[in-house]
Image (cartoon, rainbow, N blue to C red):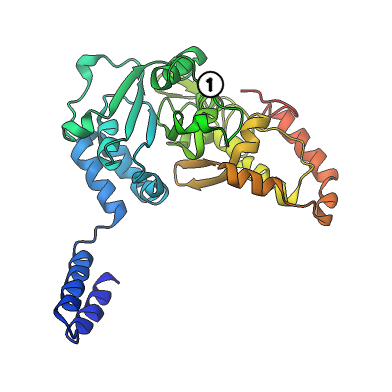
Amino acid sequence: QEYGELRRVASLGLRCSTSSQASSMLAFIVSLVAYTDPAEELYGIWERNMGKNMETKLQTQYHFAYAQHLAPYRTRNNVTLLEIGANTGDSLYAWSEYFREPGATIWGMRYGVSDSRMKKCRAGAANCAKVHIHDGDQSSARDLRALVAAAFGDAFKAPATLANHEWRRAGYDVIIDDGSHVPAHILFTFTELFPMLRPGGVYVIEDNAFSYADKPTHAYGYRVGHRGGIGRPTTDNAVERFKALADIVNREECFQDLDIVIFSEAIDRAVFQVAFVSGLVFVWKKTAAQQAGLAGIPSLRWTSHANGPALQEYKRFLEAGKHVGVGGVRV
């Protein structure tokens, strides 16, 4: 497609009437020739910084989804990214190159990895300086809160409203959970850290295969699968919990009286969009404008027809799986 456009533009360039027009046309042609597919560019960044450690990302082809969904954040000068599961640091170095603006900050949480095992950053001095690594366990509320305090100060608490000016100073724009992959840990970490996401930010969960395990197995030394499996709304199935957010994001227009809670009332009300890509879950937080606009949707006459037997049956289904208690979450 790009080369077809190149031929068309080149033919127009032959008919340019002035040297300035010809120069502008030539510059545009050069830009087309220099075009790099965003997914291929990210793949190259991973390859340079991660080497053999990018095997999982190579197998899963995550670069397509990341290139599409992280593009809006890439050019923000003050973007702050957090990756749970920093391991030996090479993925953090890759993100420091991808988020190329000098004001970007890259945080990583590692667990059980000593300094001696950390890889050398090869992303260039300016990019390497963006990276900060914190030790902690994602299943510990204390450790997660210490992580947030290290990034934004002990006094930082998630502002009560999305319109609060405090979000300009603190909060994450992108959070990636590439940690233990244990569904219960995923749900717990999301409950703790999604409130720390800036308005308009995105939360990503990688490698969700263990949510589908319906026989006991192990994930990085943790036992999983004894209550999981497709369609089972338990704490051993994080994917099923995020599926339930589809009903939450439809609530303003389709079901304003829906009275279930998936994570917490505050978290549920802040979710704008959910996307599922092979192995990945993306959850976006509303901006203040989105929240205000959706809250202003008038009550529609057909929503009264949704509060019937199906809703009661769905609540029993959720409760039976200990997926959610109406009015509160069970992690």
Q: On the rendered structure, is 2 left or right of 148?
A: left
Residue 182 x, y percent position in the rendering: 48, 26
As drawn, 150 above or below 46:
above
What residue is at 36 percent from the left and 36 percent from the top?
78
The x and y percentages for residue 160 are 61, 28
Camera-nearest residue between 154 and 70: 154
Q: Which residue is mark 1?
A: 157
Which one is nearer the viewer's eye here, 6 or 222?
6
Query: Is 289 placed left or right of 113 in the picture?
Result: right
298 shown above or below 15? above
Amino acid carrying mark 1 in the image: Lys
Local secondary structure at mark 1 = loop
Is 228 displayed left or right of 36 in the figure?
Answer: right
Residue 57 vs residue 192, the one in the foreground: 192
| Occupied quadrant, residue 3 | bottom left
- Residue lying at 54% horizontally and 25% vertically, measured from the top left: 158
